[in-house]
Amino acid sequence: MIRRLGRYELLEQVGSGGMAVVYRGRDTALDREVAVKLLHPHLASAPDSRARFSREARAVARLSHPGIVEIYDYAGDGAADSYLVTEFVRGCTLRVFAHEVGFGFPEIGALVGRALVDALVHAHSAGVIHRDLKPENVLVHEGDRPAVKLADFGIARILASDERMTMTGALVGSPHHMAPEIVEGREADARSDLFSLGTILYWLATGNFPFAAPNPTAILRRVLEADFEDPRAVDARVPDALADLVVRCLSLDPERRPSSAAEVREVLDRLLAESGLERAPDELVAFLRDPAAFKAAFPARAVVALSARGDEALAEGASARALAFYSRVLAIDPENAEIPAKLARLTRRRRLQRIALGAGAALAVAAATAAVVVLVPRPAIAPPASAAADARDAAQPGAGASTAHTGAGALPSEPEPEPEPVRDPEPRREGDPAAAPAREAHAGQRPRVPRGDASARQHESPGGPPASLSVHVRPYAQRALLDGIEVARGEQLVRFSIPPGRPHVIQLEHACCAPFVREITAEEAQRIVELRVPLEPRPARLRVEGDPATRVYVDGKLIGTAGESQRAAFAIPVPSGAESPYEAPARIGLEAAGAATRDVQVKLRAGGEVIVAAPTPAPQPPPAFGGPQPAAAPPAAPHSDGAVKP
């Protein structure tokens, strides 16, 4: 017998959770398919919960946006049951979509995230906060114009803070995505939604959750400590602008997050346009209609768009901005043959500029010396040339629009002489706490860098001149930081000026490698003077597109199936015996049922990604006349998921 709630028939249950049960239903008055979300009796029976339910339902019902599941009706205050009636969305959750289809590139993940932000802009402008953003509350709608839709707006507010534990002991709200102020029991606002959005953007860009841990308690601890790895360290292809936006969204202090969802949307629109995705809503529809074709076409589109923007920046004299665009090209297409030549010209130009500036400075000093009778003693330490040059470069028009973030394989074509292996003149004992950051970086762990304003801390140091430390970096330092402040970019020789007093932290980063982090004092820097640092290469990533059942071999060793690589790329260490520690050839074997085994020769680059196509099974010949006929395949069951997730 079909259960009824007023004019709604409950046809089948499609989901259940700690707060409610979701049914596919039918509106008998309008003869249309709907979703009915029925609040659990132990919640509906509480007068306060019923009042909040009606209040939130009325607020959310005012929202009208293509990216938000529409509410048609809700139970009145005097109804025996508390329920919501919404449109029924045929499709799946974003979590399921990511597992079964995936996004392929951080920019495509950002394209999906941009649709969520657009829905938040509409909701926040109406004064409605979601409070429980997570991939399970995002639905991927199938149809003539596919879309992603936010569900369950305001539902978490139905429960009071002391009711957030259900009868089963489950926490209402995912710990992976809860803003720290909600964890601490404070009131949520629009900035809490931006924190949760940041966790989703991180996941869309890298495939990982920022605060992942073995259990909810450990997850919440990491949330409260803002303990997460830079997204660029998880996937070197993540653009700097996207990484910076995500880091801002995940700020522990709500005041440090973006000011609004509209600001987040603006950053994503600019990032997507730079990658050739200028009409984001239409591009999202194209991706959802044919994800495989869209992912296959994206690299070529992005390379054309980013190269053109890099050329424009170079013509304007904004070399830092040009380097940022060229680096993104190489992150997407490490085999690109044009960018290395452009980088070589850019490197030569910057060297000539520095030589000219240095000669001009020398002439100025000579003229000043000749004109002044009183002799002034020469300073003991000269300012670091690389830091000064990069400061001049960053001052060019548009240099701040994007930061350089070079992908794997983006090495300068005019390298410095090959650096020697690291020889620390004072080897540290295993128990020495000053060696811990370097050990963490070498082991692939997230390095710990002291927080706070480094410049302010330096003013607290005792007087005396700073010590100069020259560091030769292999392959080179995309970024060099002192106490968390960038001092050089794109250099193989980095000169640090170490203030006296307490220990300071130097950090060297390259997308292809694990960061090098070390604590050092001015006294140590004076003794060492020069340091050689070969960065530890990260594994390469391998994805195989096509038949998920295809078996994948690397140099004759079975490592898994194509389907596994589509869910999470295989991590392939770059062979240590290669001529270069940052790239090496490899043989990929692909074995699919009904197709001949195929070998593909590829080049693995540290931190880079290689995508190969699985062989297509050969068509089966028709059976001979009178022979046995193949059995008909059973009809596929329709794939549907309820419009509102519990």
Image (spheres, rainbow, N blue to C red):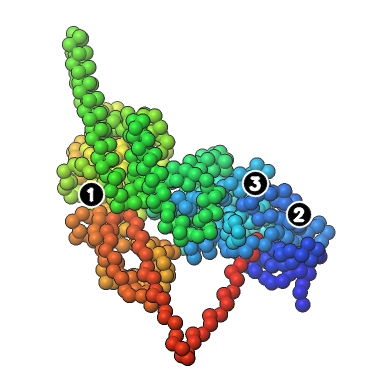
Q: Residue 118: in sight, yes or no? A: yes
Q: Label 3 sits on what residue type?
A: Ala
Which residue appears at 78% of the width and 62% of the height?
30
Question: Which quadrant of the view contains residue 637?
Answer: bottom right
What is the x, y in percent for residue 403?
Answer: 38, 39
Asked whether 575 or 346 is in front, the reply is 346
Q: How far apart are marks 1 and 2 (CA)?
A: 62 Å
User: Mark 3 sits on what residue?
Assistant: 123
Q: Residue furthest right?
A: 78
Q: Which mark is residue 534?
A: 1
Mark 1, residues whose alpha carbon is within 10 Å: few (<14), some, or many (≥20)? some
Q: Residue 496: in sight, yes or no? A: no
What is the x, y in percent for residue 6?
Answer: 81, 65
Judge whether 346 appears above or below 328 on screen.
Answer: above
Q: Label 2 sits on what residue type?
A: Ser
What is the x, y in percent for residue 189?
Answer: 62, 45
Mark 2, residues whose alpha carbon is within 10 Å: few (<14), some, or many (≥20)? some
Q: How many marks?
A: 3
Left or right side of 41 for 202? left
Q: Distance between the residues labelled 1 and 3?
A: 50 Å
User: Mark 2 sits on what residue?
Assistant: 54
Q: Label 1 sits on what residue type?
A: Pro
Q: Judge depth for marks 1 and 3 and give the one in front.
A: 3
Left or right side of 492 for 79? right
Secondary element at tag 3: helix
Asked whether 416 or 592 is in front, the reply is 592
Q: How far apart are marks 2 and 3 (CA)?
A: 18 Å
Which residue appears at 39% of the width and 29% of the height?
397
Which residue appears at 41% of the width and 44% of the height?
305
